[in-house]
Image (tube, rainbow, N blue to C red):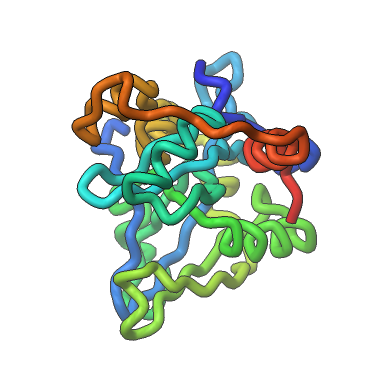
Amino acid sequence: MSESYETFSLDDIDASILQESSRFKAKDGESYRVSFAWFPLDEDGFLKGGVTPKFIKASRHYVEGNGYIISQGAEWDQLASTYGSKGKKLAFGSVIIVWPTDRDGAVEKSKLATGWKVQTVILDKNKFSTLLKIHNEWNLSEVDINISCPTGGGQYQKLNFMNCKENLLAKIMSSDNAELKAKISKAVADAGANVRNDLGRDVTIPQLKSMFGLASSEFKTSSLSNDDVNDLLSDTTDFDL
């Protein structure tokens, strides 16, 4: 596993489908009810209860024409910034279940058993900070989250979060419906394998140079002070909101 990524639980702030998995993207003016669902599996292959969902974080660059690429260190960051990146930013990924609802986020109970979707979700630092505040008060293993996207906010995913009264995933996983529990558990496990890819691509320095049409000798790094190095390391290893 690349050292640029770090997987953690919300209990560890210091470190801080049978259906096709896809990345969640809210639409203008719509609301969604979701359960954060990236839990380990128990000995029966079901999502384990009594724990908080996992997240993975990484610092990444957005490079026009090449999408999101994961930071691989100081030389890599300088090269990316020289050729199009506006700087690296911390991002957080996890897995959610999107429950069937109307446009206002009200659950459609008749579709609950079959209308759910498992998706990956990518959050910037500000969105994750808001989510963490809800978790610290209510615990994401015990409540669902209502995600609303204001009109005009879809392009940049300007999302609002609010806790719901209960957690639909927890209710299903405590039921006797073994078939549904197995389907959901497998779907979440499968989606968890895609979270890293949705955060960004791992690209080596030679690959990055090739991407920018550079020969190996065309790029040289500048010297960095100890403070510069400490700042860079802090960006990728510390969870500090």
- Residue 139 percent coordinates (x, y): 72, 54
Between 112 and 200, which is closer to the camera in this rendering? 200
Front residue of this view, candidates 212 and 224: 224
Q: Residue at x 56, y 48 (%)?
A: 90
Query: Which residue occupies 78% across, 57% down?
Result: 136
Quadrant for the C terminus, please.
Answer: bottom right
* Residue 29 visible here: yes
Look at the picture and state if 175 lies above or below 218. Answer: below
Residue 180 in the image: x percent, y percent? Answer: 39, 36
Residue at the limit of the structure toward the bottom, as seen here: 151
In the rendered picture of this protein, how many numbered marks are placed on residues? 0
Whether residue 12 is visible here, answered yes or no, is no
Left or right for 179, reference 241: left
Q: Quadrant of residue 134?
A: bottom right
- How far across and how far down the image is residue 165, in percent? 64, 68
Q: Is residue 45 left or right of residue 155?
A: right
In the image, taking residue 153 as reference, residue 137 lies left or right, namely: right
Question: Residue 152's image quarter?
Answer: bottom left
Residue 161 in the image: above or below residue 100: below
Q: Position of residue 110 (x, y in %)?
A: 32, 62
Q: Residue drawn 65% across and 42% down?
A: 235
Residue at image point 59% right, 46% down: 170
Q: Nearer the viewer, residue 229 or 64?
A: 229
Viewer-closest of 200 and 36: 200
